[in-house]
Image (cartoon, rainbow, N blue to C red):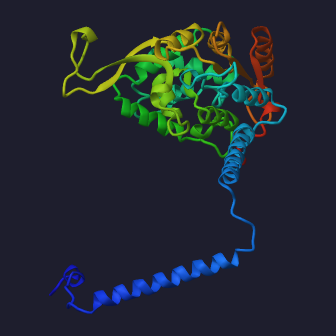
């Protein structure tokens, strides 16, 4: 039996008259085409003359200009469509972008110096549900995870209890930053980076406590996501500089923000080789049988001056734009606008929305005062945003 391939490739009998038939057909078609062009030319003889080359070039240029203006309009206006027209950030940022991207402007910033830094919790995503994402993650690990809660240390459980008090009262206890960092390092010790990432993302997919129809991974401020997109569309390199553990920051933001993992910076814990044991890194060489795992040691909390230090170490350039929401971001904001050779700005969010968000008017007023004292621009979640989490999400 012949295959379909054999049937398709079966040779046909030669037809000696076929080439002449083809040539005749082509010549006939050519004659018809020439006749059509001649008739069309005669019909247009009395119509308007063809455009001169210069006129056509001007028309092309005008068309390109119209396209450019439309694109600029979309970038400067619709790109921030979730911001009210009266929002100071919207007006300032769009005017800023016009000048710093114009090569003829004194404020022009070369692409390689267009650096923007963003805090994460309370700036890009929900900070109070009823607390930080990484605090909720640790509490879940130590108190609720059936695979770990019976293995949790006394120190980890003590920290989890302090976190629960913080959730219940809304007051952040002094010293919790370091306690929490240490507990995260020990509670997730020994995991590969892939295992840790999957754990974070699994918890990211759980429902938020304070809001309906939203997971923790969806609890990002939509107007701020627009700002990130707007900056990137104008050739900005965007970094997340968070107080949250670096690996947790990556897991939470991955797939939500179009930012490489290398541009997501956070607090740090030690990383070691799986067969390293107690040997110092200077005494051990990574082997073919090794994997990189979490080492269990808390290294640094990335807040306040530590944010400035990490920017200098890992970015190596002074940002021209900074976005934050708390006193932990103040150093980063001042660093951005102080003695900057380029036009710069800092925008700090005020959690003043009590209807759509777990706001805090006392904190919001304190931030507004800080903005006035330091030359930052205050962002009102209540007055400046048309939405926070999008349609269908409501506060319980």
Question: Which of the image's four quarters has the N terminus?
Answer: bottom left
Question: Residue reaching furthest left?
Answer: 1
Identify the residue at image location x=54%, y=26%.
134
Identify the residue at image location x=62%, y=81%.
39
**Residue 395, visible in the rendered structure:** no
Q: Quadrant of residue 43?
A: bottom right
Residue 295 position within the rendered picture, expressed as x and y whole percent measured from the top left: 35, 18
Q: Is residue 44 above or below residue 207?
A: below
Identify the residue at image location x=53%, y=33%.
253
53 or 308: which is nearer to us?
A: 53
Residue 130 position within the rendered picture, expressed as x and y whole percent measured from the top left: 66, 29
Q: Going by the image, does 328 lie left or right of 144?
A: right
Q: Quadrant of residue 19?
A: bottom left
Question: Which of the image's four quarters has the C terminus?
Answer: top right
Identify the residue at image location x=47%, y=16%.
314
Q: Quadrant of residue 27?
A: bottom left
Residue 204 position within the rendered picture, expressed as x and y whole percent measured from the top left: 53, 37
193 or 133: which is nearer to us?
A: 193
135 or 100: which is nearer to us?
A: 100
Question: Residue reaching furthest right?
Answer: 86
Q: Going by the image, does 79 lie left or right of 242?
A: right
11 or 388: which is nearer to us?
A: 11
């Amino acid at each position: 039996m012949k295959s379909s391939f054999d049937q398709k490739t079966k040779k046909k009998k030669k037809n000696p008259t076929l080439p002449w038939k083809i040539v005749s057909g082509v010549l006939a078609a050519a004659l018809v085409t020439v006749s059509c062009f001649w008739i069309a030319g005669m019909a247009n003889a009395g119509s308007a003359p063809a455009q001169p080359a210069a006129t056509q070039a001007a028309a092309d240029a005008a068309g390109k200009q119209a396209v450019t203006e439309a694109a600029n309009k979309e970038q400067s206006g619709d790109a921030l469509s979730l911001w009210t027209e009266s929002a100071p950030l919207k007006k300032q940022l769009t005017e800023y972008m016009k000048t710093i991207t114009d090569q003829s402007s004194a404020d022009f910033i070369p692409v390689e110096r267009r650096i923007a830094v963003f805090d994460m919790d309370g700036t890009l995503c929900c900070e109070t549900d009823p607390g930080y994402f990484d605090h909720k993650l640790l509490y879940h690990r130590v108190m609720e995870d059936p695979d770990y809660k019976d293995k949790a240390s006394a120190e980890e459980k003590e920290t989890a209890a302090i976190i629960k008090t913080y959730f219940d009262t809304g007051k952040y206890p002094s010293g919790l930053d370091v306690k929490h960092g240490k507990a995260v390092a020990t509670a997730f010790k020994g995991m590969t980076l892939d295992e840790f990432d999957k754990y974070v993302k699994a918890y990211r997919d759980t429902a938020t406590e304070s809001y309906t129809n939203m997971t923790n991974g969806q609890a990002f401020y939509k107007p701020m996501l627009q700002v990130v997109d707007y900056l990137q569309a104008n050739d900005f390199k965007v970094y997340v500089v968070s107080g949250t553990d670096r690996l947790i920051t990556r897991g939470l933001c991955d797939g939500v923000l179009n930012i490489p993992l290398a541009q997501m910076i956070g607090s740090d814990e030690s990383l070691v080789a799986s067969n390293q044991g107690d040997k110092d890194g200077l005494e051990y060489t990574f082997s073919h049988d090794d994997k990189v795992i979490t080492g269990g040691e808390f290294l640094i909390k990335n807040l306040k001056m530590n944010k400035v230090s990490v920017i200098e170490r890992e970015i190596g350039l002074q940002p021209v734009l900074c976005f934050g929401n708390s006193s932990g971001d103040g150093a980063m904001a001042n660093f951005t606008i102080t003695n900057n050779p380029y036009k710069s700005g800092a925008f700090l969010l005020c959690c003043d929305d009590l209807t759509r968000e777990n706001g805090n008017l006392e904190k919001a007023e304190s931030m507004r005062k800080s903005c006035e004292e330091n030359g930052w621009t205050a962002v009102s979640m209540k007055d400046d945003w048309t939405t926070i989490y999008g349609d269908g999400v409501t506060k319980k």
